[in-house]
């Protein structure tokens, strides 16, 4: 097997294969992804702006939602612009340093979202199961600390996995079988046994994904028990609506992310395509849908949007 030294490998960078085996699909994806990316930017930016401008949204739930929206903005931006450039330009190249940065940022943000979603479930648990003590328990300092734990945990996991992944020799292999740099695709380039990395990766999955899922399930089991004890049907409906948006986001994110591991080492073209489409779903579609889900199912957000539009309209009339 032909070997390349590290200097030459670093200068060559990597080739992101992406959807190049399906050129007709690429053209459809280019238009679709561009539209979705614009919607992701507008939707998540709107959530962040609203949570800052409307005093009624200055509560823990919307503090965490603003964190999630900022995270989703960065999450999508870490892969989509590079992907669009590669589809349009056809070269599909990414530098060695760019690949490291992309893997580190994307994995860090994804890991952070896993932890943040469990923190948001805990917030809903306290709001419904301990309503009289909610403001005392979920004070501003605790919210900031919980958000910091999510970010630090996510990027600590990413740092470890990124270092271990790029220490592996690749022996001249530089074609990444995806549209962005990710750990499973990079492990496939290695010319040595990667079992240690795979064990570490699955251990990280347990810590970053399985444990937060367990905490979310624990929170919602207790939430359901508390809601069942509510006497009025209106109160039960309000409680379920409060949690419905978050639960739907959890199902979409974890469902697509965990399913992606079934296609970690695809053999045929069909499996490859499914794996890439799953990665596209949790990397782009879920962040785009999150603000829509929270906006359509949340009266406070819809009211904040209405008031902001009315304020802008009044300012326009005054200027005229």
Image: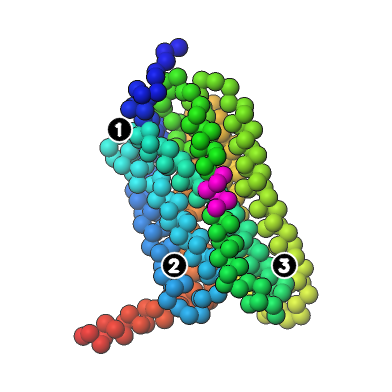
| Residue underneath mark 3 | 223
Judge whether residue 53 is colored magenta.
Answer: no
Q: Name the residue located 54 percent from the left edge and 26 percent from the top edge.
A: 267
Q: Name the residue located 52 percent from the left edge and 65 percent from the top edge.
A: 65
Q: Residues within 10 Å of mark 2 (few under 14, many from 20)?
A: some
Q: Residues within 10 Å of mark 1 (few under 14, many from 20)?
A: few
Element class at badge 2: helix
| Residue 15's disc number | none
| Residue 91's disc number | 1
Q: Tell me how far mark 1 sits from mark 3, CA to CA.
A: 51 Å
**Residue 200, horizontal then vertical, whole percent:** 62, 35
Quarter containing the N terminus: top left
Quarter containing the C terminus: bottom left
Mark positioned earlier in the residue sequence (1 or 2): 2
**Residue 163, horizontal then vertical, whole percent:** 51, 35
Q: Answer left or right for 31 relative to 249.
A: left
Q: Residues within 10 Å of mark 3 (few under 14, many from 20)?
A: many
Looking at the image, residue 164 lies above or below residue 153: above
Mark positioned earlier in the residue sequence (1 or 3): 1
Q: Quadrant of residue 60?
A: bottom right
Q: Answer left or right for 174 relative to 317.
A: right
**Residue 219, horizontal then vertical, whole percent:** 71, 62
| Residue 48's disc number | 2
Element class at badge 3: helix
Element class at badge 1: loop
Q: Name the residue located 48 percent from the left edge and 31 percent from the top edge.
A: 166
Q: Tell me how far mark 1 sits from mark 2, CA to CA.
A: 36 Å
Q: Answer left or right for 288 relative to 256.
A: left
Q: Which residues are magenta?
A: 152-157
């Amino acid at each position: 097997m032909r070997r390349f030294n590290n200097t030459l490998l670093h200068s060559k960078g990597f080739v992101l294969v992406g959807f190049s085996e399906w050129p007709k699909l690429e053209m459809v994806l280019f238009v679709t992804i561009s539209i979705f990316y614009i919607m992701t930017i507008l939707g998540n930016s709107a959530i962040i702006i609203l949570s800052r401008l409307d005093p009624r949204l200055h509560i823990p739930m919307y503090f965490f939602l603003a964190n999630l929206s900022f995270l989703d903005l960065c999450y999508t931006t870490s892969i989509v612009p590079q992907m669009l450039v590669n589809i349009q330009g056809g070269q599909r190249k990414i530098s060695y340093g760019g690949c490291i940065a992309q893997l580190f940022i994307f994995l860090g943000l994804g890991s952070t979202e896993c932890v943040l979603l469990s923190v948001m479930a805990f917030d809903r648990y306290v709001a419904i199961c301990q309503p009289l003590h909610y403001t005392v328990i979920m004070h501003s300092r605790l919210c900031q600390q919980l958000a910091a734990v999510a970010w630090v945990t996510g990027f600590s996991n990413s740092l470890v996995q990124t270092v271990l992944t790029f220490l592996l020799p690749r022996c001249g292999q530089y074609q990444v079988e995806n549209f962005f740099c990710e750990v499973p695709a990079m492990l496939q380039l290695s010319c040595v046994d990667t079992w240690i990395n795979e064990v570490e990766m699955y251990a990280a999955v347990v810590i970053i994904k399985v444990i937060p899922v367990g905490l979310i399930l624990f929170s919602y089991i207790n939430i359901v028990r508390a809601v069942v004890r509510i006497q009025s049907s209106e109160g039960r409906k309000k409680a379920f609506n409060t949690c419905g948006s978050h639960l739907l986001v959890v199902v979409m994110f974890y469902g697509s992310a965990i399913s992606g591991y079934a296609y970690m080492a695809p053999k045929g073209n069909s499996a490859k395509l499914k794996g890439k489409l799953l990665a596209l779903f949790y990397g782009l579609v879920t962040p785009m849908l999150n603000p829509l889900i929270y906006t359509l199912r949340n009266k406070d957000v819809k009211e904040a949007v209405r008031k902001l539009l009315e304020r802008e309209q009044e300012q326009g009339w005054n200027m005229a």
